[in-house]
Amino acid sequence: MPQTTPTAPASATPPLAPPVAARQPHSMTHHGVTVTDAYAWLRDPGYPEVKDAAVLAHLAAENAWFEARMAPQQATMDALFTEMRGRIKEADKSVPQKDGDFLYWIEFEDGAEYKRWWRRPVGSSDDGSADELILDEVALAEGKDYFRLGALSVSTDGTRLAWSVDEDGGERFTARVKVIATGEVLPDVIEDTLSGLIWVAGDTGLVYSRANAQWRTDNVRLHRFGSPASDDVELYHEDDEGFRAGAALSANERWLILSTGDHETSEVRLVPAAAPLTAPVLVKAREEGVEYDVDVRDDTLFVHTNDTHENFRLATAPLADPASWTTLLEGSDDFYLTGFELFRDFYVVEGRVRGLDRIEVRYYDDPARIEPITFPEASYEAGLGDNPEWAVSALRLSYESMVSPATVFDYHVAEQRLETLKVQEIPSGYDASAYVTQRLEITARDGTLVPVSVLARKDRVGGGPLYLYGYGAYGIAIGPGFSTTRLSLVDRGFAYAIAHIRGGDDLGRKWYKDGKLDKRTNTFNDFVDVGRALVAQGWTQAGRIAIAGGSAGGELMGAVINSDPDLWGAVVAHVPFVDVLNTMLDETLPLTPGEWPEWGNPIEDADAFALIRSYSPYDQVKAQAYPPLMVTAGLNDPRVTYWEPAKWVAKLRELKTDTNELLLKTNMGAGHGGKSGRFESLKETAEEFAFILWQLGVPA
C-alpha cells in the first residue's frame, strides 16, 4: 500500500517560492498523434506503493508551500472551524430503528470524532440498563491517523457482528467478526474487501466481494466460518474488466442477488440465501445499454429496467421464467423512476418529477392505488431511510431542503401521515426565516434550461460574492439539501448556488446522457453559462464567483478555468480528475476499463481520443492568466491517483502568466475523501473557505 510520509519537518524554514517540478522527456503516440507529458515522472513506477524519493520530495515541497502561504490565514481557519463545530451537536444519537428483536442506533459523545453503535431488546426500558454496545469506532480508531468503517452487519440470529475497516484511505477494507455478547473477536479475517458483508446459509457464512490487484471487484465470494479466507469459494467471477460484481439480499432475505455491470449495462443472477453454493440462475443475459436491478416477493420477480424507456420502467416476471418481463409501471418522460423497495404489504417507488424527489406507496393487489407522500416545501430532498424489516406499517424517511435542517420522519402508511421523529439540532443557533432559497432556470447556449438552486440571507445585497458548486457526471444528482458548513459563507454575504448541470441525472436519464461521451462538453458549457447568467441577473459580478468541485467535479473546475478564467475569483478543486486522456489510455489503472462507457475509449476510438484530448484539463493548460486555485490530493486515493493533481499543478506553474495563488495540498495518509473523523474533515472545509475569503477579499 502507499507509504505514509510527513509533509515536511515541523522545524523547516518556510519556503520563499513555490516548488518547480523538473521536466523530463516523455511522449506517447496514439492514432498518429504524439502527445508529450513532461511531468509523467510524478507517477511512482512502484504504484500503488509510493516510495520514489523525488516524487515524495516534490509532494512534500508542495505541502510546505501550501502551509507557508496559508499560515497567515490561520486565525480565519480557526474562526471558521469554531463556527462549523459549534453547529454540530456533539453528544448526539440517531433515532432507534427496529430490526428483528432489537432496536439499533448510533451515538456520538462530546468531542468524539467517531460513533458508537448500540442496540437494546425490543420492549426493554430506554433508561440505558438494557443498552448493548455492539461496535465502538472510537476505540477502533484510537491512535490511527485515518479510520473509516466500511460494512457492518449483524447475523440473522442477532448473536454476531461482521464489520470492515479501512485504515489508510486506500479503500481496501479488512473484515472481522465478533460475538456481540462477549466481545470475542473470531479468528476469521478477510483482507481487501470492497463490498457489504452478507450473512447466509443459517449464519454459517459471509458473502462479499474482494478487490483484485487493480482495485476491481470482479468476484463474489463465500467465506465459511472457521476456514481461512484463502479457502473462500468464488460464487461468481466476472471476466469483463469493465464490469464490477457485487451481491445483495432480497427484501425478504430469501435470495442472494448477484449483480454485475458497468455504467450502462447490467446482468443479475439469483441464488438461494440458504444454499449459496447452488448454481446461480441468470435473470436475463446482458444486453449492451440495458440496465436492470431486481428484488423478489414470493414467486414474483420485480425488475427495474431501462430496456423500453430511458427513464426506466418497473416490470414483473415469474421466478420460474425470470426473463419474461411484464410491465407494471410504464416508463415516462415526466417521471424518472430511480428505484423501488418491496415490503410485505406494499411497495414503494422513488423518482423525480422535474428534478423534485417523489416517493409513492403502491399496492400489489390494486395497481390503480397510488399514494404519493406529500412534503411541506416546494423544493427539497427526500428519500427512504433505513427500513430493514419486511413487514412494516411505517416507513422511515429522510428529508431536508436548502433552508430546512435534516429531518427524520416516520410515514404511517395506513393513515398517510408524516410523524416528525427528529430535526437536526444546531447548538449555536439557526433561524430558517433569515434565509431564502430559489430555484432558477438558466438558458444555456444551446437553449437548454438548466436548473440552479440558490440560498442566501434575506438581507443580502445583490452583486456580492457567490459560491457556485457543480459536479455533472455519472448520473449523480446534486440535490437542494441542507448544510451547516455553507452558512459560514452565506452569513458573510455569499449566495450559495448549485448548478444542476447535464451529466448528472437531476432531470432524468436523458439529462445524464446529454453530459457524457460525445456530449461531455455540455457539462462544462452549462456551468459557465450558469455563472455568466448569475452575473447578468445581478446575483454577483465576474471575478466575484468562487467555484468548487471534487473528483469529476474537479475535472469540471479544470475545464472551466481553461475556457473562461476571468469569470472566477477563486477555485477549489478537490482530488480532481484532470489527467483524463492519460488515465483513459491506461487500462492497468483501477477504474479505467469501467470508465470507458462514461468517457469513451481513446485506445480504440480515434474520435474519443480527439474529444477527450480537447477538454482534458491537463492537456489543455495554456499560457494565460488563471484565477487563484487551491488543489487537494490523497496519496492513497485509488479513484483519482495522486499524480493527476500533482502533474496539473506542475504544468500550471510552468505555463500560467499571472501571479495568483496556486496551492497543492496532498494528504499523505488519506484517500479520495480526505481526512476521516467528523471534526478533522471540518478543518479541511475551513481551509477551503479561508482560501476563498482571502482571495475574494471578504472580511473574515
Image (cartoon, rainbow, N blue to C red):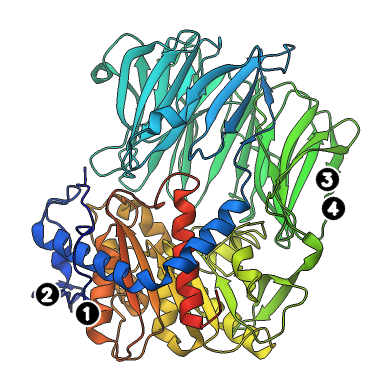
- Say which residue label 3 marks: 372
Asked whether the beta carbons under mark 3 and mark 1 sit within 8 Å of each other, the answer is no
- Say which residue label 4 marks: 376
Q: Which amino acid does label 3 sit on?
A: Pro
Name which of mark 4 and mark 1 comes first in the sequence: 1
- Residue 14: where, in percent of width, then height? 23, 71
Quadrant of the rendered structure where residue 190 is?
A: top left
Residue at 42% x, 81% y: name it.
Answer: 561
Name which of mark 1 and mark 2 comes first in the sequence: 1
Quadrant of the rendered structure where residue 487 is?
A: bottom right
Q: Is residue 485 left or right of residue 242?
A: right
Per the model, the C-alpha gap separating discs 4 and 2 is: 58 Å
- Say which residue label 1 marks: 17
The residue mark sitting in front, 1 or 2, is: 1
Label 4 sits on a secondary structure element that is loop
Q: Quadrant of the C terminus?
A: bottom right
Label 1 sits on a secondary structure element that is loop
